[in-house]
Amino acid sequence: MANGWAPDGAVQDQIDDSVKDALASARARLPSGPGLVDCEDCGEPIPQDRRRALPGARTCVACQEGRDKRPTYSGINRRGSKDSQLR
């Protein structure tokens, strides 16, 4: 396949790198350390089932849903010029 200056497979390499970066970012946001019995945002008790399913949980479901709705921004710019993406 003709890709200009890029070697064969460079586009797939870029896709793979983007997926790896997204996974690393998601894993970094997972709770770690000791969980809480009461939500750190509202003070309501965190259900035992949630604490068992998600060790390290620090918020109740309602507060976590609110946090999840906030926009997040990636520090990775993958929209530069084609040449910069394929290096």
Image (tube, rainbow, N blue to C red):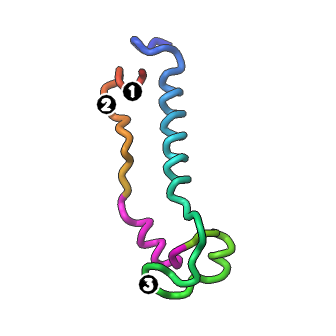
Position of residue 76 relative to residue 61, above or below, is above
User: Which is nearer the N-term, disc 2 or disc 3?
Assistant: 3
Q: As drawn, is 24 to the left or to the right of 51?
A: left
Q: Amino acid at mark 1?
A: Gln
Q: Secondary structure at mark 1?
A: helix
Which quarter of the picture shows residue 33?
A: bottom right
Q: As drawn, is 47 to the left or to the right of 39?
A: right
Q: As drawn, is 48 to the left or to the right of 75?
A: right
Query: Circles 3 and 1: CB distance less than 8 Å?
Result: no
Q: CA distance from mark 2 to mark 3?
A: 41 Å
Give the percent coordinates (x, y) of residue 30. 55, 60
User: Which is nearer the N-term, disc 3 or disc 1?
Assistant: 3
Query: Circles 1 and 2: CB distance less than 8 Å?
Result: yes
Q: Name the dominant secondary structure of the magenta segment.
A: helix
Q: Which mark is residue 42?
A: 3
In the rendered structure, which segment of residues is drawn in magenta?
58-71
Give the percent coordinates (x, y) of residue 9. 53, 20
User: Which is nearer the N-term, disc 1 or disc 2?
Assistant: 2
Q: Amino acid at mark 3?
A: Cys
Q: Which residue is mark 1?
A: 85
